[in-house]
Image: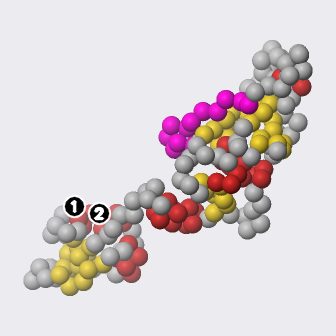
Amino acid sequence: MRTSIQGFEDMYEIDENGNIYNISSFRKPKDGSERPPLKVSKNSSVGYMKVNLSKSRKNRIPGARRDEHKRFIHRLVAQAFIPNPLGKPEVNHIDGVKSNNHVSNLEWVTCSENIRHAIDTGLIQHEKVEIHKIDPFTNQILEIFLSWRDVKSAGFKSNSMLSKCFADKNKIYKGFKWMKP
């Protein structure tokens, strides 16, 4: 099943697999046959499949302004086929494969849900934190923090101050030394 792409109605359609078709009349072959899906490219910086959509007939009209719009395929599929009643801003690939843009492999998620999914499936590594609060006079470990949230509750407003403490092992902040083991 194919449907129009939002913002590009009467120009492009998308199917449940993420294939994009140019349906505008100025792009149809003269013999009346259907054009194949548009070629998509992989965005090398993030690995998602993308396509350039155009609202102008730049190749047909001399001097026409280039009006291209880069779009990620997974977002186009989700916008076309997956309801989003809660207004979640991100689209997750359920199997973690960024080139699998079939509607059954996509879901709307929040940023935190997307990150949690990536950690749970091993797509990204969750960095374990261990930070020691040390008495500057005895060098005895007074407390061990195992999360950034816990460290911030100890009075750190930003990670930059913590980094400064790690760079200088004698740096004292709030009356204590702070170290990573």
Residue named by callout 1 = 167
Q: Is residue 42 magenta?
A: yes
- Disc 2 secondary structure class: helix
Q: Which residue lies furthest to the left in this view?
A: 138
Q: Are marks 1 and 2 in contact (CB under 8 Å)?
A: yes
Left or right of 69? Residue 11 is right
Residue extent of the magenta highlight: 37-48
Residue 59, image x and y in percent? 77, 18
User: Which mark, by number, is residue 96?
Assistant: none
- Residue 111, by quadrant, is bottom right
Which of 27/149 is in front?
Answer: 27
Q: Where's the N terminus, which quadrant?
A: top right
From the viewer's perspective, is 20 left or right of 138? right
- Between 15 and 158, the one lying in front of the other is 15
| Residue type for callout 2 | Ser
In space, the residues marked 1 and 2 are separated at their CA atoms by 6 Å
Q: How busy is the neighbourhood of tag 2: few (under 14 within 10 Å), some, or many (20 plus)?
A: few
Per the image, the residue denoted by label 2 is 163
Looking at the magenta stretch, what is its main secondary structure?
Answer: loop
Residue drawn 33% across the image and 68% down it? 128
